[in-house]
Amino acid sequence: MSHDTDKLIRQLSLVAFLMAERRPITARDVKSNVEGYSEMSDEAFARRFYSDRAELLALGVPLNSQRDEFTGEELYTLRSEQYFLPQLELDDAELAALQTALYLLEGKFAYAEPLRLALQNLALGRPGFAETTTETALRVEVLDPDYSPEMPGRLAKLEGAISKQRTVKFDYWSISRDELADRTVNPYALLPDNGIWYVVGHDLDRDDIRTFRVSRIRGEIKFATRRERDFRTPTDFDIEQFRGRPPWQVGEIVGEARIEVRGDTAWWVQRAYGLTGRLEDGIFVTDYSSLSQLASWVLRQDGRAVPLEPEELRREVAASLRRVRTGHEGKAPEPARESPVRAADGVPDRPAGPVAPERFAVLQALLAYLLAACGEDKEARIPAAELLSRFPSVPADELEEHLSLLNLVNFGGGCYTIYAELSGDEVLVDKELWGDTFRLAPRLTPLEARAIRLALEYVGPMIAADAHTQLRGVRRKLEETFGQFELSQLPQPQIELAEEDLVTTLARGMRENKLVEIEYQKEMDTQASTRIVEPYSLERQMPNWYVHTWDRTSGAERSFRLDRMRSAKLTRERFEPREGFEPTRLRGARRARILYTPVIARYEVERGARKLADGSALREIPVGSDEWLESEILSKRGEAVVLEPDELRHRLAARARELAKELGVERLRAPA
């Protein structure tokens, strides 16, 4: 057998022995009675036993130890009430809604298999439960712009390194310096933030906690040593400290800014940035680490945000507007020829497999499923196809091997649990002496817990809408099952209650073909407008939700971003769905050609622009509205120039001149 297989048998046998004995066990008892340890030397046993205990604890298996006050020996216990899932209060609608999350995410969700295994455990023993989808779910599309064929493999490797506390080495493209360099990192946690994946850890070369964007890792991620563990995650590490920061707060804070928010805009600023700043009588007060990034945000508001303090911020805004005006006056510049693509510019790595559930967890769940199929009887027959559909992470040609592993679980120790064999297209199961001990589903592993939390973050409001309940209740019930392990490495889902309510209302309008009255404020408007819409479909493009509609107020197809929607109210009036009408975001939009200066070209290449020989970049983008493009170009602070269409160039030059007057910065000089 392989080293990995031997370890699995030892670990499963250790759990079986401790559960069967139900009394404190000494290390000598373990060595004598647990399969895989008895023939080891004392030194080898001590090393392997310590390693197995650490891995089991990392998997959420609640092994407890305490020292005997008389003998001084360490005593080990595993209490069944801590090992198994507690009795859940999830009703069938809530559980079915979680299955809807799997349906929505499976296509490009790196954590689909751990999510499936978690749901398999949650659903164990629920008669009649199946993977169902709702009518609403069929009208929801989930898009992840940060997803790539190589992303799942990177996440899988980092997940393994985090759980085993192994140091990793990789090549990392530093976009700000445009250089590729080796990095050696103790990874503490993975963080999805605003639709982008990051790994947070201790950079050993720089002796500092650093955040690395996973999509900027190049080549293979390798373990730095051959040791079974390289580091321990600090007890005071909290992943929440690294998420939700706006761009102007990334890095060391150097000052505080005051920005007037005009018109009926304060509600949106409070919703979007209430945790990173405060509102004082219409003034947004926020700390900053980067004046240029804060100036970019001010300019994106296109007149709805007026910089007051510090003076350096006002000067930066003034200089940016002068660059925008200069770049759009006169004839459009001629772009350079395209540049050859380098590895650091995004040549994809060899795709690897997605994040797979730990093999130990798969065997745990498979054992519980086989025993549950026996019920009160001593044996059962299960179609092999049923097992393979329930456990997609088990390849068909490895099913027999998995069953054989379960047959070996503490066979030598005398507390074996099951005998199962593949016979033709069926699996024959005999429940052995200690089988009833393991009929319940085990607690979720940290990886399964992460998969559920990510599902809540990606499509949580949709789950709540289909379960006809508030998401906080489902989340609370689920987190009670996450097991006895440290949650500091599992970021809390960022789901606004307002967002959940909006999705619920719009989803009901879709199901019942009812008109919805929405109060909506476009990004460039100072006041909200009221619309009556026919809702047709929802889209989750990380990190934003969109609803695609026929807008009766304007008499046209319209898509609305939910974070700009103040309210949504279901009306009593029904509508007849328009035949053949399938609205999508930006359908029929005209296209604009944008040239980006070398200052920001690398960032735009990462978003899909083509790099040019002089270091600049060129991109064609769909334009849903001229106002949106105006806001987008202004936010680039003069480092982006519209080449076509020509009328938008004139519009931007004029707007930059007007905006400088509106903000009272037209006479300010650039910062020194």
Image: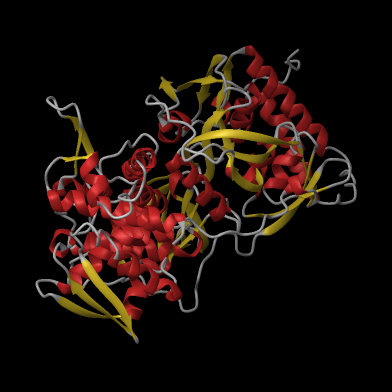
Question: Residue 605's spot in the image, x, y percent?
Answer: 73, 46
Whether residue 323 is situated above or below residue 158 in the rendered picture: above
* Residue 293 in sight here: yes
Residue 116, by quadrant, is bottom left
Residue sitting farthest toward the left: 376
Residue sitting farthest toward the bottom: 424
Q: Quadrant where the N terminus lies?
A: bottom left
Q: Quadrant where the C terminus lies?
A: top right
In the depicted view, which residue is nearer to us: 314 or 195?
195
Which residue sits at x=58%, y=22%?
Answer: 207
Whether residue 588 is situated above or below residue 318 in the rendered picture: below
Left/right of residue 236 with respect to residue 523 in the rendered view: left
Residue 13, by quadrant, is bottom left
Q: How is the image coloured?
A: secondary structure
In the depicted view, which residue is nearer to us: 172 or 495?
172
Question: Residue 254's spot in the image, x, y percent?
Answer: 57, 14
Question: Residue 375's spot in the image, x, y percent?
Answer: 13, 71
Question: Residue 242's spot in the image, x, y percent?
Answer: 47, 31
Whether residue 233 is situated above or below residue 447 in the rendered picture: above
